[in-house]
Image (tube, rainbow, N blue to C red):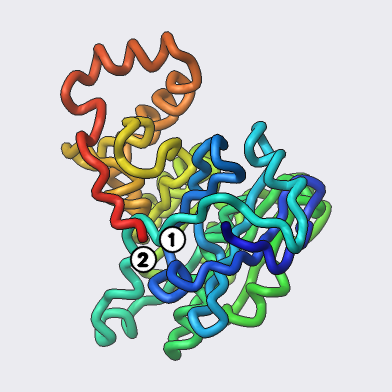
Amino acid sequence: MYKILEKRMLTDTIFEMKIHAPRVAKSAMPGQFIIVKNTEKGERIPLTISDYDAQAGTVSIVTQAVGKSTMELMTFNEGDSVCDFVGPLGCASDLCTMPAEELSEKKIIFIAGGVGAAPIYPQVKWLKEHGYECDVIIGARNKSLLILEEEMKKVATNVYVCTDDGSYGFNGNVTALLKKLVNEDGKVYNHAVAIGPMIMMKFCVLTTKEMGIPTIVSLNPIMVDGTGMCGACRVTVGDEVKFACVDGPEFDGFKINFDEAMRRQTMYRTEEGQAKLRFEEGQTHKNGGCGCGGN
């Protein structure tokens, strides 16, 4: 059992939990995720690590209550425990393994949509701790849905906020704000990381491609099982078949077939859709093995 040490409501449906999980905290890196099970017979929930403290033995997760299991998790409070907390899973951010001389040449812009601010935060924090600067865009539909703005300001060089309805910050979406920063304010970037809903990442990539800014995206929104076994997170990257949970979750955004990924995401919600995908994709439908490296 893994004890919830702290719980904080960030919005009406988005919450942050700090979990006591020393082994996970010791090995965690920005970009990785964990799998939570609320109870012994509960559903496996893949969630990105939003912060970690190896010394304190804690791992933080940010979750939006959108389905039965995440709504159930939201009812848990400080002092309660979750049954399973497995990880770290997936690959760490490339920024954390990049040679110092290469990283020092990067002019980085992070683009966060909604809950995407959570997986972006540990990457920005890691860069700050290692002496590198970066800018961050945080966007949401309205002010009430913005998260981690103040936390991000403590670790980023500049934080730019936008809302679709203009209720706070720049009036417009994240791509419109990026265009303003580059085209009107003279900002220069040669590396972008975009994390958020699939449709948001698709249009971010279309924009950064026009601007010639190489872009990394995180495909954790399409994960279901989290171990490469179920096939839900199968994605085409260039001309290769990959699985977001074991090969990612981060990939070169210019190579992602977003339309295919979003179609699969929709079809996988029904048994009929899953059967159709199994027929269409044949032997590439599933990864064929776990390889998750959990501990």
Residue 161, label in figure: none
Percent position of residue 61, x then y: 59, 59
Percent position of residue 60, x then y: 59, 65
- 82 or 198, nearer to the observer: 82
Residue 184 visible in image: no
Quarter holding the N terminus? Answer: bottom right
Image-quadrant location for residue 30: bottom left
Relative horizontal placement of residue 263, taking residue 290 as reference (left or right): right
Image point (68%, 45%), residue name: 73
Image-quadrant location for residue 230: top left
Quarter holding the C terminus? Answer: bottom left
- 221 or 255, nearer to the observer: 221
Percent position of residue 42, x then y: 56, 37
**What amino acid is at disc 2?**
Ser
Image point (76%, 62%), residue name: 78
- Tell me the residue that label 1 is attached to: 193
Mark positioned earlier in the residue sequence (2 or 1): 2
Residue 210 against residue 6 in the figure, above or below: above
**What amino acid is at disc 1?**
Val
Image point (67%, 36%), residue name: 66
Image point (71%, 60%), residue name: 147
| Secondary structure under the numbered disc 2 in the rendered image | loop
Residue 93, label in figure: 2
Residue furthest to the bottom = 131
Percent position of residue 200, x then y: 53, 43
**Contact (Cβ within 8 Å) of mark 2 with mark 1:** yes
| Secondary structure under the numbered disc 1 in the rendered image | strand
